Amino acid sequence: MSIFCLGVNHKTAPVEIREKLAFAEKTLPDSLREILGVGEIEETVILSTCNRVEVYGAASLTASALDSLSNFLIGHFDVDGHEVEFYRHESEQAAHHLFEVASGLDSMVLGETEIFGQVKKAYATAQEAGATGKRMNKLFQQSFSIGKLVRSNSKIQHGSTSIGSVAVDLAEKIFGDLTGCKVMIVGAGEMSRTTAQSMVSRGASGIIVSNRSYDKAVELAELLNGSAMRFDDWETALRDVDILISSTSAPHPIIHAKAVDSHMKERRGNPLLLIDIAVPRDIEDEVRHIGDAYLFNIDQLTKIAEEGKSRREEQILFCRNLIAEHIEEKGIAALKSIPGDTTDRPPLDTNRPITNP
Amino acid sequence: MDLLSLTISTLFFLGGFASSVWKVRSGTYHHGYTNLVLIGAGFIFQCFFLYSRGQLHGRCPITSGAEILVFIAWSLAIMYFILGRAFRLSLVGAFTAPILVILHLPALIITLFNPAEPNPTDSMDPWLEMHAAMSLLAYGAFALAAVSGLMYLIQNRQLKSGSPGLLSFNLPPIRYLAAALLRLIIIGLLLLTVGVISAFFMRTAPSRLHLSVSGGVWFVYAAVLIYHLVKRPPAHWLSMASLIAFGFALITLSVI
């Protein structure tokens, strides 16, 4: 018996296809049981996230199991077989693929941590549904060990890679814990919303939204559990907020150094982070010279995010070597001979080079 | 014995500094406690040195320039263990270690060329001991305040530049640094106040120069603190002031 993986991810299929193939969380146990009845598949785990839909499994004849599974998925989701192209990995390649997925090396945002929890959850769901056996247990347990190994021994998680996470990191470099930090959004655009949401996810509260269209401000404030403010009044709140995110479509700066300077005197030494994601810029550049005021514009945020991405990309090879060393030392547990399994094939030579899937 | 203890202690502090530099460069500063362990080991040998000198003189070991420097370094190490970590100041050890080395090196040279002679006193004056010990502990707090101030200025510069680098990633947040800096100046000033008041109870009245110097350092830090609390200037002002004031305190020490 051997293991396999069949699926699509953000690299091989557009979102239009991925969303058609996504397994609903509620029906996942039923889907797992259905797959167990396909092509002599004896064990299975479904990993269904926004960036990937993958079915891992164990079967005696993996090639025919993969064909049957592919046909099953096409029928199950009622998709055109020509528009979906599943990738297929068997034995070492399947294991290696899961190890990279759990380590965040196959993620859209390289090194992101969310996938590790998603893999754990997928395995737990399959276990509860009774869809796992010795092979899947060993495979997934090993993937968790490798995921932890890679994350704690490399810099794959270092640095931020999106505007929102860069803004949060900068806020934490200024305020430390963001719990209780007050955030004001000037201009209710999409970028402001995602950046503010990132701040809220780290504990920021007291969101104030100010926009030329008051209705839009109210709408966004409700979404963020904050309060709306008339555009003419936003400056009065400057004294009390810790973080200001600005993204209006004004053709010239609306936040002037003189105004910030006079408010800073009233803040009695409390720092103020100003994030300007508007083009043309909303905040006068002279603001950066004011003591305790920290200004970042869209170019600076993008540059930091790009540097973060490059630093992570530089780590890919190092992480792959960590995985290879681990496999060289311990082998692939799910492919080793399991007592009582009569369908076992001879032990694999795990020292042979691994082809990157 | 004392020379050996001081040498080993200095080497441990040097190791702590080297380890910090290496870890910051490799981006793994947050992993492990190497720096803390190395400074801790250096501190133990520092205690051996001060203990052996204390035994030699039969009193608080602050009878020579070398001993005063080591005593200040000891105070700084104590402040680092107690306050540096309590204030969640990541990387403070990396900045403390080189200052410990800087304080130890001249002490080591002095000890190497001028072996210690017993310097007992006819009668113990607890107020004198109190004055000296509290004043030097205050210097330890002021040294750590200067370390925090320097870290603040570096972090501030990194953030103001718009492209903070790897060092910024390892440095503590601006707000923590500013809070720690203020608390350390307050602690140092309280300790120095006790030290200065003790001087008035000493059996032998201190010289006018000695009193002026102690009072001068006290006055400088009190002025910095009052100005900060009343006017609330930007935090980089307090950071600059802590560095300048500590420089002044070190200069006055050579006068004493």
Image: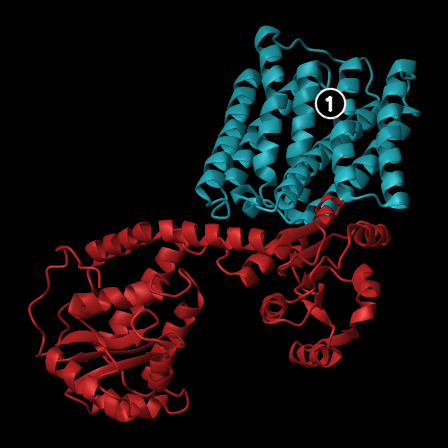
Name which residue lies at 84% across and 22% down.
Answer: B125
Location of residue A305 with respect to A130 vertically, above or below: above
> A164 and A257: which one is in front?
A257
Q: Which residue is mark 1?
A: B60
Q: In x, y percent, where is residue B246?
A: 75, 28
Amino acid type at image mark 1 = Cys
Q: Quadrant of residue B92?
A: top right
Name which residue lies at 30% across and 51% down.
Answer: A317
Q: Quadrant of residue A282?
A: bottom right
Quarter holding the N terminus of chain A is: bottom left
Q: In x, y percent, where is residue A274?
A: 69, 56
Location of residue A135 with respect to A271 vertically, above or below: below
In the picture, measured across the screen, residue A184 lies left or right of residue B27, that is: right
> A70 and B189: which one is in front?
A70
> B44 and A308: which one is in front?
A308
What crowding class fits label 1: few (fewer than 14 Cα within 10 Å), some (14-19), or many (20 or more)? many
Location of residue A110 with respect to B44 vertically, above or below: below
In the picture, measured across the screen, residue B86 lies left or right of residue A306, that is: right
Secondary structure under the numbered disc 1 in the rendered image: loop
Name which residue lies at 67% across and 35% down.
Answer: B150
Q: Chain of mark 1?
A: B
Residue A115 makes an appearance in the image: yes
Which chain appears red?
A
Q: In x, y percent, where is residue B139?
A: 75, 29
Q: In x, y percent, where is residue A334?
A: 20, 70
Quarter holding the C terminus of chain A is: bottom left
In the picture, measured across the screen, residue A303 lies left or right of residue A268, that is: left
Which chain appears cyan?
B
In the picture, measured across the screen, residue B187 lies left or right of residue A60, that is: right
Q: How is the image coloured?
A: by chain
